[in-house]
Every structure is written in structure tokens, then in C-alpha cells.
Image (cartoon, coloured by chain):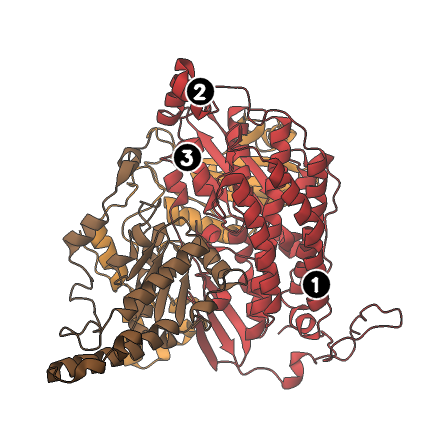
């Protein structure tokens, strides 16, 4: 049985003499569970949570075996949203797969587009243009912000705070507007193409993003003020669902889950893709590996994304977005309709697709949920033999039984929320 | 209200006329109450659930249309909003949720995947939830914008206001599954699950 | 080429069938009998330290003559290096391979997924069941190339099977501790558990 030595003073923290919010003293505590005696063996109860339950963040189903209110075992059942993405990908051209990637992790569609495009380009040996690189960084970081916003909103609802949800969704709406300005869609963006982007950004977009960067941290500070030192929040998250660094590596956790456990591994910094190695940003790393640290890591990542976005806007230089290869990139509609050669290229790309050489490529990118890997195997035709998504939240979720064991049922909800799952990606 | 109160010239009319007016009045009262305080049961599975949440959040706020209270329990819900794709593994779940809802109940199918299977014309996906449960309003889009969902909800309001308690054939009977365990005849399911558009070209691998 | 490939050849000799490079990634083909030994060596040897299992998946080619490959992506977090290990399984033989769950707990669900989608059996896996499809799924292994995109059964039959499935049918009493007490349950309860759990759907076609 796990020990709970979290200390909570059940009062709203006041201000210290300097006027800063006072930290909650970690002193008076809820005693360890042992003091109530050893739980009875045998009198166990089975509870089924989901697949249709507001706290499971989608159609996850948990079968929980309880001893009193203590979780003895929890068995997640996934697959309720299995949509056959990988099978569909074998019947699609490379560019036709990009709309599918939107719908896997639908909380950060743009980052998924980038992940797939990078893998396809690695497979085909394409070098993308500098402007395209910057645009993709912007796409990735915008996705990180909105994904973490959903996580913050839904998790705070799970733990009883409704207000941050409304704040978070207001920020999301602002990013939605930007995404719509860029791609025409709020959610299913399909923004990349193999060798470039679907569209270039406009000056309005740059102005809008700049305004967003300037004003958005205010919301983060507000959320920070409401949650970080909130007695209820601290009490329900600290010391809950602990994964040590060793366990986190053994369970193949990635992303904020891995870093909250104290493993300083961020794909952006340690195996850089795009040109992340030239950006200045910090990788927040947790210490205790509990739900609270995961929250802190994600909150800080939002700030760091903001930093990266600011730098990206600085280095946004004029230039072509797509590679200068007419076999890869669709000609503009006006040329396809007036120029014979452009029309032939257009026809061949749409009907036959772009052929990839025989080979295989794996690209992992740092998605908001963790490392999103795209593994493509080609046999020389225009459709991949295998399109494999390495789903970060699927692998993170596999550690849930380990994390929840010995905690209370209400902690299970907090732990499940802290994994930041999105069922579209878990089940694919 | 205005239409119902225009009963000044009732003298000399047949008794049936008066009865009809009384029925109108009852229908108006019942239907307005039903339409304007719908309790949605959000069956959110995929991308559409995110747009559903956006519809519920501050900017679009469907509480303006009487949907303040989201019923996460089917036993207290009026309208089932299926937001997102529905794989076969989830089919018995939505059927059970539908069966658990008390009458009167309505179903909104939100998004292309719930309505037709969308781009997922494959082994895992139900090709339209109307093969499982009866659907009142289909909202197109992948995913639909919040405005689209709100429009669908308003259409449902319109539909509810057109119903009558005094129809000869009671429209609000439970529609259980038949002895095969299906809602529709197998031929009909096969027919509405056929691939459409150009997706037949994508059938072959290679 | 990743130097680990040469080190593996020097240590295991014939068990390493060949090494290749594709798009800058090193791929080592390992004999299936030696898989666990190779993986343990890669994980624990100083200088290799592939302590992080990125992914387990499988690839079947459109060419029916080519074997099915089980693919392991390994990473050394300390050295920031990746290595891909592949095991080839003949499609005509039995698709069975040793599980790496004793080395990495993270492989648990990944191997279950490969089993679910490709029908590869992992020997020594603690809990090898279907994970994405339901347990009584009768149509086969979806990601195999001989599996049609829309499945083997007609749409009506698929809907019928789905609707006739019992949503509670996946409690799987064996995996819960009540299974230990199963023999002591009264006969009617045992019967109910049995009916509620499996073979609810008679296979047809």
C-alpha cells in the first residue's frame, strides 16, 4: 500500500509580507494509509468506468478493482475508437495521408501534419526550404499550446475547477482563428505537403500571432495563480501517480510524462529536427514524477513555446515555401489550367501520386503528448507499404495500472487525466 | 402563442374545431418546453467532441438555447449528440445508451463520420450511426463548426415544435432491435454502407 | 552506419543475419532465436546502453515471398543514438517470437497490438490478448495484406455482430482476482459469468 505523506493546509493561501502569494507549508499532512489498518483481503469490488464517462477523456474504459476506496488493480480497455488509420494509409498516396494525420491526435493537428511530412521527406530525400522550416516550427508550437490548453481545461474540470476550462478554451479559440486564417479549417488543418506547405501565411496572420504571443501569457499567469498554490489542487495532485525515472524509461514514457519523472529528454533538443537546435528554449524537468510535476512541466512548456514562437517570427524571411521540384509540388491552379507542362505534372501527381524510393524512414518529433513517431516503409510505389504511428499517449497510458495502484479511486481520475490521452491517437 | 390565441371566431364552429385548438395549445406548451430545455447527452468520441466542447465553452455557449445542463447520464437526457466516429466496437455502447434514454428522445449525428463513416470506409467503422439508432438531424462537416452544430440544434427545435401528441400513429414508441438484433433489414444496411464518390478507386492496394 | 552493428556482429556472429542502412537509419537483422539475448546485450552493455524501447511494430510486404518483419526501435537516452532491430518471420511458418516484456515493461501493449493486427505470437508475454479489436473478433488480423480494407464480412453482418456483442463482455474475469475464486462460486453464477464473457456471438459465414 502506498504511503501518502502529502501535506495540505486546507485554507486559501494568503500573501506573504512582500506581497507574493505564500507557498503552502508542506507540514500538517494526511497520515499514511497504514494507520487505518491493513485492508481486508477478499472483499473486493469491481467498478466499470467508461467507455462513455466524462472523466475518461474520450472512450477509454477502465475496469477497477477496489478494496474499500483503494484501487487494487485497474485494467484499461482501449480500442473503442479504433479507426484503422494504418490500414487506410496503405491505400493512399503520401499526400493523401496528411488529412488522415489530422484526425489521429485531433488536439494538435498541425504537429501531426509536420511529423508525417518530415518522415515522407526523409524517405524521399527532400530538403525543405528555410521559410518552410520556420513555418513548421510555428505550426508545431501553436499545436503544443492548444493541446496543453485542452489538457489544462479538462484536467481542472476533473479535479473540480471549472473556470480554467473557460479561460483555456478562449485561448484555443484565438488559435483556431489563426489556424483558420492559415488553412481554412479550425481543427482539421492538413497544413503540410510533402516538400512544403499547403499555403503560405499572410501578413494578417503574422500580426495576429504576434498579438497572441503578447497577450497569451496573461492567461497562463491567471491559471498559474488559480491552480499552482491552490490547496485543493496541490492536495489532489502532489504525490499522486508517481513514476520514478527508472520506471519511466522502462515503461517507454515520453514527452511531459518522461520529463516530469526527471529524465531530461526532449526530442527537440536531443535529436533535433527542423532547426530546433538553433532556437533558445529551456526544457522543463520535474523532480517527483507525480501529477503535480506533470502539470508544472506542461505549464512551463506553454511559456517556452511562446518563446520559440517569438523567435520564429523574428527569423521569418521571405523566400519560397515549397521545394522547386515540379514533380513533388502541385502547380498553382492558374498555371495548371493554362500551361501544358504544369497540367501534366498536376495530372500525374493527382492520379499517380509521388513515388518514393525503396527504403524506410523513422522520424520522431516532440508532440505535445510525447514522442510522435512516423515509420514509413516504401516498396517504390506511390503508396507506403506500412505507415506506422508511434502513438505517444497509447504508450503513456500503458503505465496507468502501475501508477494508479494503491491510490484512491478519486486519485485514479487525476492520474488518468495527467497522462493526457487522446483516444483518437491511442486507438488509431 | 399568437396562432393559438386567434380563437375569437369560434362561435359557430364545429366542436372538432375547438378540440383541434385545444390540442394545438397543448402541443404548443409541451413542444416549447421540450425544445427550449433540451438536455444533451454528449456521446463525444473523436475530433467532433472537441468542436462540441468549443460549442459548449464561452464563445459559442449553447446554453443560450436551453442546453445549459449537459446530462452525462443517459437516464436524464433528451438528445443524444453523437460527436465523432463510431467504430463497431463502440456500436453496442451507443445502442445501449440510446435504449437507456427515456422518451421523448432525439439523436443528432454530428459530423461526417457519425453520419456516413466519413473518410473511414474500412473494416473498423460503422458506416453511419443510422444503422444503429434512428437519427433526427445530421450535421455535416469534418468536423462541423460550432455554428453548424448550433444550426443543427435549432433545426431540431423546429422539428420538435412540429410534433404532436395527438398523432394517430404514436411517433414516440421505443424502436427495439428485431429478432436478428438489427435495426434495419440487412439489405438496407448493406446499401447505405456502400462506398460512394471516388472511394471505390482507393480499394486496391499497390 | 551505427557502430553497434559491428559490435553486434563481433559478439553474436551468425545470429546477426545482416545489417543495412536506409535513409541514415541503421537496421540490424537478428535471428529470432537470439532475439532476447541480443536485446539484453544491447540494453545492458556499457557503450551500447539502448535503455529505451521506442517502438515495436511489424511490417508485411505486398510481395508475398518476403517474410514478415517484427521491428524494434531502440534508443540510447544517454548517447542520443537510435538503432533498429528486425526479426524476419516466414509467413508460411509459425509467426512466433520471444517477448521482450521481461526487458521493457513498455513493450506490453505494443506487442499486444502487433498480435492483434498481425497475428504474431509473443512467447512469454504476460497477457497476450487482442487490444484494439474486441476479443471475439472473428474476421482475422486487419493489417495483414490478405485482409480486405473493408473486412471479410458484409456490412450487415458486421453490424449484426457488433450489436449482438454484450458491452460487458470484456470484463475478462480471468484477469481480475475473482478468477482465483472462480471454482468456489455457486454453479449458477459460474454459468452466468461464462455466458456473459465469451462466445456470446456465434461465428457465422
Q: Which mark is residue A222?
A: 1
Name the chain letter of the residue that bears numbered label 1. Answer: A
Q: Which chain contains the residue that carries disc 3?
A: A
**Could you say where residue B185 lies in the image, as x and y percent from the top left?**
15, 58
Distance CA(mark 2)–CA(mark 1)? 50 Å
Determine crowd level at label 1: few under 14, some 14-19, many 20+ residues with C-alpha closer than 10 A.
few
Alpha carbons under labels 1 and 3: distance apart: 41 Å
Mark 3 or mark 2: which comes first in sequence?
3
**Residue topped by disc 2:** A335
Q: Earlier in the sequence, mark 2 or mark 1?
A: 1
Chain corresponding to brown in the figure: B
Report the residue at 34% width, 45% height from top.
C142
Q: Position of residue A63 (x, y in %)?
A: 45, 69
Nearest the viewer among A23 and A18 is A18
Please tell me whether mark 3 or mark 2 is closer to you in this view.
2
Task: Kindly indicate whether the residues beneath marks 3 and 2 are on one polypeptide chain.
Answer: yes
Which chain is red in the picture? Answer: A
Task: State the image coordinates of residue B62 (x, y, percent, origin top left).
Answer: 46, 65
Residue at the right extreme, as displayed: A17
Residue C63 visible to the viewer: yes
SS assignment at label 1: helix
Residue drawn at 53 percent across, 81 percent down: A68
The foreground one among A17 and A48 is A17
Amino acid at each position: 500500500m502506498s504511503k501518502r505523506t502529502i501535506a495540505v493546509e486546507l485554507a486559501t493561501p494568503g500573501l506573504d509580507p512582500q506581497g507574493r502569494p505564500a507557498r503552502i507549508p508542506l507540514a500538517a499532512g494526511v497520515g499514511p494509509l497504514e494507520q487505518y489498518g491493513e485492508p481486508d483481503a477478499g472483499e473486493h469490488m469491481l467498478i466499470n468506468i467508461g467507455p462513455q464517462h466524462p472523466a475518461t477523456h474520450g472512450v477509454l474504459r477502465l475496469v477497477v478493482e477496489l478494496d474499500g476506496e483503494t484501487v487494487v488493480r485497474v485494467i484499461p480497455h482501449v480500442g473503442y475508437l479504433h479507426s484503422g488509420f494504418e490500414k487506410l494509409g496503405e491505400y493512399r498516396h503520401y499526400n493523401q495521408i496528411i488529412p488522415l494525420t489530422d484526425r489521429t491526435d485531433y488536439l494538435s493537428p498541425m504537429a501531426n501534419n509536420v511529423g508525417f511530412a518530415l518522415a515522407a521527406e526523409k524517405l524521399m530525400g527532400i530538403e525543405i526550404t528555410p521559410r518552410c522550416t520556420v513555418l513548421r516550427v510555428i505550426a508545431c508550437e501553436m499545436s503544443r499550446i492548444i493541446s496543453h490548453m485542452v489538457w489544462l481545461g479538462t484536467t481542472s474540470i476533473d479535479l473540480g475547477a471549472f473556470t480554467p476550462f473557460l479561460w483555456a478554451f478562449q485561448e484555443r479559440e484565438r488559435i483556431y482563428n489563426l489556424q483558420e486564417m492559415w488553412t481554412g479549417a479550425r481543427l482539421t488543418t492538413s497544413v503540410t505537403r510533402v516538400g512544403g506547405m499547403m499555403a503560405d501565411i499572410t501578413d494578417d496572420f503574422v500580426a495576429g500571432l504576434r498579438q497572441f504571443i503578447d497577450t497569451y501569457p496573461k492567461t497562463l499567469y491567471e491559471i498559474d495563480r488559480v491552480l499552482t498554490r491552490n490547496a485543493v489542487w496541490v492536495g489532489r495532485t502532489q504525490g499522486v501517480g508517481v513514476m520514478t525515472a527508472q520506471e519511466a524509461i522502462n515503461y517507454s514514457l515520453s514527452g511531459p510524462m518522461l520529463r516530469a519523472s526527471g529524465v531530461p529528454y526532449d526530442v527537440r533538443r536531443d535529436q533535433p529536427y527542423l532547426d530546433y537546435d538553433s532556437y533558445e528554449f529551456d526544457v522543463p524537468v520535474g523532480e517527483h514524477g507525480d501529477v503535480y510535476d506533470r502539470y508544472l512541466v506542461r505549464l512551463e512548456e506553454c511559456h517556452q513555446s511562446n518563446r520559440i514562437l517569438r523567435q520564429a517570427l523574428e527569423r521569418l524571411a521571405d523566400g519560397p515555401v515549397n521545394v522547386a521540384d515540379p514533380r513533388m509540388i502541385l502547380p498553382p491552379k492558374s498555371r495548371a489550367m493554362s500551361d501544358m507542362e504544369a497540367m501534366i505534372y498536376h495530372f500525374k501527381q493527382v492520379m499517380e501520386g509521388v513515388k518514393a524510393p525503396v527504403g524506410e524512414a523513422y522520424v520522431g518529433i516532440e508532440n505535445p503528448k510525447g514522442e510522435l513517431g512516423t515509420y514509413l516503409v516504401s516498396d517504390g510505389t506511390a503508396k507506403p507499404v506500412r505507415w506506422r504511428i508511434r502513438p505517444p499517449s497509447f504508450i503513456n497510458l500503458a503505465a496507468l495500472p502501475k501508477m494508479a495502484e494503491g491510490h484512491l479511486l478519486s486519485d485514479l481520475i487525476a492520474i488518468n487525466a495527467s497522462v493526457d490521452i487522446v483516444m483518437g491517437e491511442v486507438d488509431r | 402563442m399568437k396562432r393559438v390565441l386567434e380563437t375569437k371566431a369560434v362561435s359557430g364552429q364545429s366542436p372538432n374545431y375547438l378540440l383541434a385548438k385545444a390540442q394545438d395549445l397543448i402541443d404548443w406548451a409541451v413542444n416549447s418546453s421540450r425544445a427550449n430545455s433540451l438536455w444533451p447527452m454528449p456521446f463525444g468520441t473523436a475530433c467532433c467532441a472537441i468542436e462540441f466542447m468549443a460549442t459548449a465553452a464561452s464563445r459559442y455557449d449553447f446554453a443560450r438555447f436551453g442546453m445549459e445542463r449537459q446530462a452525462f447520464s443517459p437516464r436524464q437526457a433528451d438528445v443524444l449528440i453523437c460527436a465523432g466516429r463510431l467504430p463497431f466496437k463502440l456500436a453496442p455502447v451507443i445502442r445501449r445508451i440510446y435504449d437507456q434514454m427515456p422518451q421523448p428522445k432525439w439523436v443528432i449525428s454530428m459530423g461526417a463520420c457519425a453520419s456516413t463513416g466519413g473518410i473511414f470506409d474500412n473494416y473498423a467503422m460503422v458506416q453511419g450511426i443510422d444503422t444503429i439508432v434512428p437519427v433526427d438531424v445530421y450535421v455535416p462537416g469534418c468536423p462541423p463548426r460550432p455554428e453548424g452544430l448550433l444550426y443543427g440544434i435549432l433545426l431540431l427545435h423546429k422539428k420538435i415544435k412540429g410534433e404532436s401528441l395527438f398523432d394517430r400513429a404514436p411517433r414516440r414508441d421505443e424502436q427495439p432491435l428485431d429478432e436478428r438484433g438489427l435495426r434495419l433489414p440487412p439489405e438496407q444496411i448493406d446499401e447505405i454502407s456502400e462506398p460512394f464518390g471516388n472511394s471505390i478507386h482507393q480499394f486496391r492496394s499497390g | 552506419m551505427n557502430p553497434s552493428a559491428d559490435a553486434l556482429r563481433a559478439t553474436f556472429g551468425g545470429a546477426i543475419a545482416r545489417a543495412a542502412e536506409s535513409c541514415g537509419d541503421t537496421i540490424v537483422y537478428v535471428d529470432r532465436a537470439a532475439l532476447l539475448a541480443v536485446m539484453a546485450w544491447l540494453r545492458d552493455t556499457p557503450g551500447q546502453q539502448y535503455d529505451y524501447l521506442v517502438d515495436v511494430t511489424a511490417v508485411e510486404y505486398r510481395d508475398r515471398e518476403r517474410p514478415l518483419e517484427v521491428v524494434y526501435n531502440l534508443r540510447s537516452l544517454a548517447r542520443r543514438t537510435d538503432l533498429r532491430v528486425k526479426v524476419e518471420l516466414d509467413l508460411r511458418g509459425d509467426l512466433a517470437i520471444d517477448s521482450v516484456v521481461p526487458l521493457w515493461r513498455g513493450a506490453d501493449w505494443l506487442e499486444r497490438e502487433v498480435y492483434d493486427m498481425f497475428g504474431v505470437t509473443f512467447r512469454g508475454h504476460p497477457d497476450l490478448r487482442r487490444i484494439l479489436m474486441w476479443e471475439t473478433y472473428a474476421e482475422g488480423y486487419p493489417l495483414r495484406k490478405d485482409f480486405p480494407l473493408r473486412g471479410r464480412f458484409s456490412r450487415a453482418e458486421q453490424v449484426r455482430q457488433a450489436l449482438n456483442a454484450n458491452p460487458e463482455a470484456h470484463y475478462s474475469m480471468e484477469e481480475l482476482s475473482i478468477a482465483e475464486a472462480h471454482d468456489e462460486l455457486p454453479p449458477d453464477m459460474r454459468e452466468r459469468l461464462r455466458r456473459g464473457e465469451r462466445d456470446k456471438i456465434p461465428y457465422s459465414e
